[in-house]
């Protein structure tokens, strides 16, 4: 693969990340969980900023526009579109939180694996400056994965207790609102 193809795939991964986190914003908003919603709004902003920086890096380094391609499959279950928020039960919330966090962890794991492979391929091409740039992105993604896994483990440890989930929302909402202002 060429550097252009590798960077194009990375840009596509960022676009998919933006779309994934945007879906999670809607997902948790539908479940009336505004702390989790705000958390994903923050990550959506971060992904957007990373995508912008990636395009800037590529243009400055290679003096070319970065082509994009790819597809995205939605993270929101199709059957949810037939319901109203007022019809969501506490059992639906519990199941939705479990599924949402599992999807998030799975997404971040796949991005880490992809970026790791991209670093390897860039190294094989001998483009070590690009290796450094994408390695930083890989480290950032691994940190996000670590936080997502820890949140999932905490939720599992309390068996996705509705009381615990609700108790966390205000704190998370404030925390990620403040963090988003700095992006």
Image (cartoon, rainbow, N blue to C red):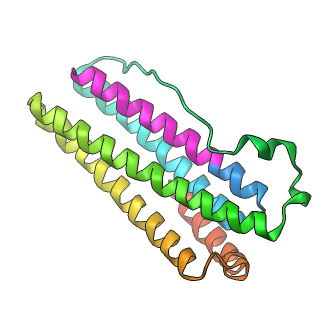
Q: Residue at x 56, y 58 (%)?
A: 180
Q: Is 11 inside the magenta-drawn segment? A: yes
Residue 100 lies, in percent from the top left, at 61, 57
User: Relative to 49, does residue 127 appear above or below in the rendering?
Assistant: above
* Quadrant assignment for the N terminus: top left
| Front position in the image: 156 or 112 | 156
User: Relative to 38, does residue 127 appear above or below in the rendering?
Assistant: above
Number of marks drawn: 0
Residue 174 lies, in percent from the top left, at 64, 71
Residue 101 lies, in percent from the top left, at 56, 61
61 on left or right of 88: left
Q: Residue at x 51, y 69 (%)?
A: 152
| Front position in the image: 107 or 65 | 107
Q: Is the magenta stretch mostly helix, strand or loop?
A: helix
Q: Which residue is drawn at 31% across and 17% down?
A: 64
Whether residue 181 can be seen here: no
3 on left or right of 56: left
Whether residue 151 can be seen here: yes
Q: Residue at x 41, y 59 (%)?
A: 145
Q: Quadrant of residue 39?
A: bottom right
8 on left or right of 14: left
Magenta-colored span? 1-23
Q: Is 101 inside the magenta-drawn segment? A: no
| Front position in the image: 59 or 167 | 167
Residue 120 lies, in percent from the top left, at 17, 39
């Amino acid at each position: 693969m060429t550097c252009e193809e590798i960077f194009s795939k990375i840009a596509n991964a960022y676009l998919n990340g933006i779309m994934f986190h945007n879906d999670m914003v809607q997902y948790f908003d539908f479940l009336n969980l505004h702390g989790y919603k705000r958390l994903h709004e923050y990550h959506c902003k971060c992904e957007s900023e990373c995508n912008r920086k990636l395009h800037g890096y590529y243009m400055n380094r290679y003096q070319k526009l970065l082509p994009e391609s790819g597809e995205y499959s939605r993270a929101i279950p199709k059957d949810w579109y037939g319901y109203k928020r007022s019809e969501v039960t506490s059992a639906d919330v519990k199941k939705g939180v479990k599924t949402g966090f599992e999807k998030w962890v799975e997404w971040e794991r796949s991005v880490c694996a992809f970026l790791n492979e991209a670093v390897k391929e860039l190294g094989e091409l001998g483009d070590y400056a690009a290796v450094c740039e994408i390695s930083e992105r890989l480290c950032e993604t691994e940190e996000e994965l670590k936080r997502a896994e820890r949140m999932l483990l905490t939720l599992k440890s309390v068996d996705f207790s509705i009381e615990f989930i609700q108790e966390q929302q205000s704190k998370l909402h404030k925390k990620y609102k403040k963090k988003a202002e700095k992006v």
